[in-house]
């Protein structure tokens, strides 16, 4: 599909696109015009009129109004709306996947995978809409009934990053919608078209269900529009994905007003390969994890911890595999790796490689930018010591650090020595090693896999990590509880007023 057809199919073509949507009503964006840039060419795809803090404030107000009615809609009826969202996404999967490839630069197969992740979380949320279970708890008082209920929370602020421009919104939005919350989305300024395309789909669903103000979008700078969203007390929950410094700021601002934050921040994900591993499987997982999305997933594989017996053979296999990676237009089905998101991403990678050399690392392959238009780089393999400072930083690029380890204990220690704690993997055929890696004395990450790579998590599990990754959990399992408020209810159906703890008070 050519760029114009992609935009037209998704209903977002035009001279200057409006940078807000949903509850905007009569509010119109009046901020500066920004451009969406195609990272494969460096050229503009479209112009968008951004919104101001005042306009974002008005959208939050309308989302807050909508919450007053949406919270009273029965859960299964809320689920019905999300079912239709999932069905609309099924219809638009190819076009939306292509737009992700066009604007973000990941290959179309991964772009479509991202849309599939949206569909999956919608399906999950539809089921959940009938399962927002509370508890019945034994009361210590006679003829008393103690229960725990879950109620809608309010407006959810969603701050998403460029690297998953649509799926991470959906993790939050599908859950928030069935939990009875309305929401305001501030997408990355690198990927406004993906957000507008998703909003367009939401607009049709809201129109049909008379639920205007449920899904809202504000496109604009973080320093104005983003700050407005995270500091507003009408937004009890902010779910933010991005860098650790960004998350520290969001956590501080939301924490100061005693709001709730779900933070999904940087990773520095290691994949351990023991001597007894299936090397072919490990190599495939490594290449997908390190080269997929050009190393710009939070879950990208950044460090390989190779046991000494297989280190030489694994390095050779990886160097050969890296030589085969086809780099180019992400919309070409033969391409395996597209560009980085922008010049800043290229500069960050190149300055990390300067540090690699200063700190004694050896570049085995890659390491250069690719001439021509767009932000293309070579996927890079580096042999380096585990304790070099650069290895402990997250560089959002296809640089993979190869590190030798003695045994399982050594690998676990190195896996855990970085400040981030998102994802981790071990490749081994030894049951005891796999079990230890995923035990209380194993990996300290939010995600720990055996014979599966660090990236590409399914939506059914809770997604997120520890330490500088921020501690948040999104998507599956019981992450929904963060989108609701818990109420403990004591109901006395006796004719007495017994006090808890057996207290007698003026009897
Ligand atoms: C992210 O990089 O922010 O596990 C999300 C994965 C994807 C999600 C990544 N399902 O790689």
Image (cartoon, rainbow, N blue to C red):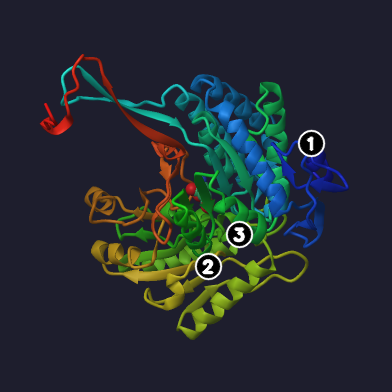
Q: Which residue is mark 3?
A: 325
Q: Residues within 10 Å of mark 1 (few under 14, many from 20)?
A: some
Residue 4, percent from left and from top: 84, 44
Residue 199, percent from left and from top: 69, 38
Question: Distance from label 1 to label 3 (Cα)?
Answer: 31 Å
Residue 328, percent from left and from top: 70, 58
Mark seen at residue 9: 1
Q: Is 451 left or right of 3, judged from the image as shown?
A: left
Residue 157, percent from left and from top: 56, 45
Task: State the residue in front, 387 or 148.
Answer: 148
Identify the element where label 3 is drawn: loop
Q: Which residue is mark 2?
A: 395
Identify the element where label 2 is drawn: loop
Task: State the residue in front, 302 or 70.
Answer: 70
Q: Residues within 10 Å of mark 3 (few under 14, many from 20)?
A: some
Which mark is nearer the camera, 3 or 2? 2
Question: Distance from label 3 to label 2 (Cα)?
Answer: 20 Å
Cβ of mark 2 under 8 A from ligand 1: no
Sequence-first tag of 3 and 2: 3
Mark seen at residue 451: none
What residue is at 46 percent from the left and 38 percent from the top?
483
**For residue 116, which quarter of the picture?**
top right
Quarter of the picture containing the N terminus is top right
What residue is at 37 percent from the left and 76 percent from the top?
387
Q: Is 40 left or right of 275, judged from the image as shown?
A: right
Task: State the residue in front, 457 or 129.
Answer: 129
Identify the element where label 1 is drawn: helix
Question: Distance from label 2 to label 1 (Cα)?
Answer: 35 Å
In this rendering, does residue 332 appear at all?
no
């Amino acid at each position: 599909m050519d760029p114009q057809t992609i935009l037209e199919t998704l209903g977002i073509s035009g001279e200057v696109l409006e940078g807000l949507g949903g509850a905007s009503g009569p509010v119109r964006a009046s901020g500066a015009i920004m451009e969406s840039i195609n990272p494969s060419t460096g050229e503009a795809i479209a112009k968008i009129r951004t919104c101001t803090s005042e306009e974002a404030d008005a959208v939050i107000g309308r989302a807050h109004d909508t919450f007053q009615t949406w919270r009273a809609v029965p859960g299964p009826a809320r689920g019905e709306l999300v079912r239709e969202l999932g069905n609309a996404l099924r219809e638009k999967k190819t076009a939306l996947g292509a737009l992700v490839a066009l604007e973000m630069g990941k290959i179309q197969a991964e772009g479509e995978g991202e849309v599939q992740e949206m569909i999956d979380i919608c399906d999950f949320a539809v089921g959940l809409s009938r399962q927002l279970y509370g508890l019945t708890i034994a009361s210590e008082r006679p003829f008393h009934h103690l229960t725990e209920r879950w109620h809608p929370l309010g407006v959810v602020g969603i701050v998403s990053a460029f690297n998953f421009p649509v799926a991470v919104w959906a993790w939050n939005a599908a859950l928030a919608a069935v939990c009875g919350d309305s929401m305001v989305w501030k997408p990355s300024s690198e990927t406004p078209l993906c957000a507008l395309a998703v909003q367009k789909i939401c607009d049709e669903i809201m129109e049909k269900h008379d639920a205007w103000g449920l899904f809202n979008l504000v496109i604009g700078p973080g320093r104005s529009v983003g700050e407005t969203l995270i500091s507003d007390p009408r937004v009890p929950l902010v779910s933010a994905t991005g860098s650790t410094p960004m998350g520290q700021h969001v956590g501080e601002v939301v924490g100061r007003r005693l709001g709730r934050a779900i933070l999904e921040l940087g990773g520095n994900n290691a994949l351990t390969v023991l001597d007894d591993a299936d090397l072919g499987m490990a190599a495939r997982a490594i290449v997908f994890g390190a080269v997929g999305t050009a190393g710009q997933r939070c879950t990208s594989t950044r460090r390989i911890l190779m046991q000494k017996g297989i280190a030489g053979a694994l390095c050779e296999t990886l160097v050969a595999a890296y030589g085969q990676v086809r780099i180019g237009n992400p919309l070409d089905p033969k391409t395996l790796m597209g560009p980085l998101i922008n010049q800043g991403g290229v500069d960050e990678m190149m300055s990390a490689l300067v540090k690699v050399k200063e700190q004694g690392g050896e570049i085995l392959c890659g390491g250069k930018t690719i001439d021509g238009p767009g932000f293309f780089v070579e996927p890079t393999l580096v042999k380096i010591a585990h304790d070099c400072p650069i290895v402990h930083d997250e560089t959002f690029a296809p640089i993979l650090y190869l590190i030798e380890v003695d045994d399982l204990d050594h690998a676990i220690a190195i896996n855990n020595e970085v400040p981030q704690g998102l994802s981790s993997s071990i490749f081994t055929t030894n049951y005891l090693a796999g079990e230890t890696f995923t035990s209380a004395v194993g990996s300290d990450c939010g995600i720990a896999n055996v014979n599966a790579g660090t990236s590409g998590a399914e939506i059914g599990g809770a997604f997120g990590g520890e330490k500088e990754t921020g501690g948040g959990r999104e998507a599956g399992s019981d992450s929904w509880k963060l989108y609701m408020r818990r109420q403990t209810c004591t109901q006395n159906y006796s004719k007495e007023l017994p006090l808890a703890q057996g207290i007698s008070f003026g009897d």
